[in-house]
Amino acid sequence: MVGFGYNLFIFLVDKLIYFVQFFGPKAKLFVEGQKQIPAILANIKTWREQNPDREIIWFHCASLGEFEQGRPVLEAFRSQNPNVSILLTFFSPSGYEIRKNYPLADFICYLPIDTKSKAEHFVKMVNPKIAVFVKYEFWPNTIKALRSNDTKLIGISVILREGQAFFKPWGGYFKELLFSFEHLFVQNTATAGLLETIDYQSYTVAGDTRFDRVLDNLAKIQPIAGMADFVKHDPVFVVGSAWPEDMQVLIPFALSHPQIKFIIAPHELHETQIKTWAKELSAIKYSDFKDKKLPEAQVLIIDSIGLLSSLYQYAHFAFVGGSFGKGLHNILEAAVFGVPIFFGDRRYHKFEEAKGLIDSKVASPIKDLSEFVEIFEGLDLEKLKSVKKASKDFVKSQSGATYTIIKFLAKI
């Protein structure tokens, strides 16, 4: 009955997909992306005719955050298996639009809407030897099609929670999906414990691959054009993935700390919103960068994509956005540089790395401007030294998931 309801819902979504594009720019991108899938499948068919003896490995990520978790595994696999072709798929435009030209994947497209016929056709055309799904992705018809195709299905950086359907008395339909996976590499012991309650044994507590990703980023970091000239020798606060709710605290904080330079990377590049923030802060935009020199200012707003993880190299302090609203964004990109991290105190509790960094006295959730100022002004040189060591020790202690996963994939 649950399966019938799911398939009916997906059928209706598929039939009404044309109308989805009128619900906003992201929805329109999603619809356009679905239209491009047949062309990608045609390319794969041609490639197979020309390379009958080569394999395809499929990596699937819901969005950009999941891509960053899967990326260390994909890149390590590519390095060790240069003759294997890689298909990379996304569900969300926020992942696909930013990574559609990612050079280490041979084919990149959206995941088809999960109807039975589309899932079966997609899997048949791709015919992957291995499919690696990142974190939360459990699409019933796609998973069943992979199982019927004898594709080895692996889950990496998996986190499960007690309230999910897999662990409900009525959740047999969804529980079956978990048992379709050859192996699950889970992030924590809590997820492992939940799997034990349904007698699922094919798992490894490997941790979060993002720790490997940020350590790799640290090792390969390159300077950003114009940034050294902007920051000079001043203390710098880097604000990552800022939402309007975050800026309600950050704008008055910045205005009351004129001795500090602020680099602000908005979560979304809405021109009107950026203009408003720039006006309130007398800020310049990174697009103002001309001839390797930025105009003099206290605040720089990054109005381009793809720089955030490298911006933290200039930080003495960091604020990571999202947890005053829908949920905290990636704090590990900041943590690897050993700086004190601040974020809103509302929606961070489900993120293990946030709790670990709080326990290590690296990160501080703040409820309002007053608490933000109080904690910030309580920092002294000794505390900053302690944060630097604790942060780097924490990140290093959690690394290694990629090696564990790659070692397993090499045996398949």
Image: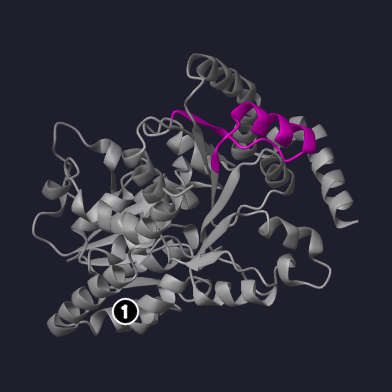
Residue 128 included in the magenta stretch of the image: yes
Quadrant in the picture for the N terminus: bottom right
Residue 403 in the image, given as x and y percentages of width and height: 35, 57
Residue 35 quadrant: top right
Give 410 or 259, whichever is nearer the viewer.
410
Which residue corresponds to the image point at 44% horizontal and 64% vertical from the top-left? 246
Which residue corresponds to the image point at 32% horizontal and 82% vertical from the top-left? 360
Which residue corresponds to the image point at 49% horizontal and 66% vertical from the top-left? 204
Q: Residue furthest left?
A: 233
The kind of secondary structure element at disc 1 is helix
- Please give left or right for residue 252 compared with residue 412 in the image: left
Residues shaded magenta: 106-130
Residue 23 in the image, given as x and y percentages of width and height: 69, 39
- Please give left or right for residue 372 compared with residue 192 in the image: left
Query: Compared to 237, does 152 lie above or below?
Result: above
Query: Compared to 410, does 333 lie above or below?
Result: below
Which residue corresponds to the image point at 45% horizontal and 61% vertical from the top-left? 329
How crowded pointer 1 is (Cα within 10 Å; few <14, some 14-19, many 20+) is rated as some
